[in-house]
Amino acid sequence: MMAPDLPRRRLIADAYAAMEPPDELWKAYLVEIARLETKGEISAEDYMLLRHVLSAKAALMDLTKGDASAFT
């Protein structure tokens, strides 16, 4: 019974993985938002939102298409 569900689950897993930013891009993003918080350009609350809200990850991927060199 589980076999017919396997391709669907694989498709969902692959789609989720494709939406995740590569490690290099994610690390650069985290460094930048930490820098902005340290300089007082964003609040601690903004930092937490940018760090943990899924829509921030989605926006990062949308703007950079997963390319770390596009993040400046």
Image: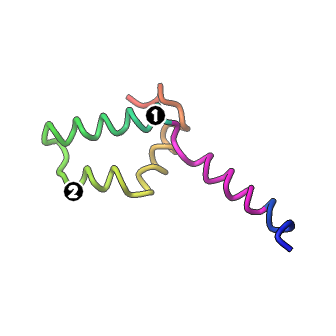
Name, please, the residue furthest toward the top.
69
Label 1: which secondary element: helix
Tell me residue 37's x, y (percent): 19, 42
How many residues crowd mark 2 within 10 Å: few (<14), some (14–19), many (20+)?
few
The residue lying toward the viewer, choosing from 10 and 57, is 10
Quadrant in the rendering for residue 45: bottom left
How many residues crowd mark 1 within 10 Å: few (<14), some (14–19), many (20+)?
many
* Magenta stretch contains residue 41: no
Q: Image height check: is 20 above or below 31?
A: below
Q: Residue at x 44, y 56 (%)?
A: 55
The residue lying toward the viewer, choosing from 62 and 31, is 31
Residue stretch in magenta: 8-22
Q: Where the C terminus falls, by quadrant? A: top left
Dominant SS type (magenta): helix
Q: Is the residue under label 2 in contact with that under label 1 (CB below 8 Å)?
A: no
Tell me residue 71's x, y (percent): 42, 31
* Magenta stretch contains residue 17: yes
According to the picture, the residue beneath numbered tag 1 turns out to be 25
Label for residue 45? 2
Residue 46 relative to residue 22: left or right? left
Quadrant in the rendering for residue 41: top left
Q: Image height check: is 17 above or below 36?
A: below
First reached walking from the N terminus: tag 1 or tag 2: 1
CA gap, disc 1 to disc 2? 22 Å
Residue 57 relative to residue 5: left or right? left
Residue type for callout 1:
Leu
Label for residue 2? none
Label 2: which secondary element: helix
Residue type for callout 2:
Glu
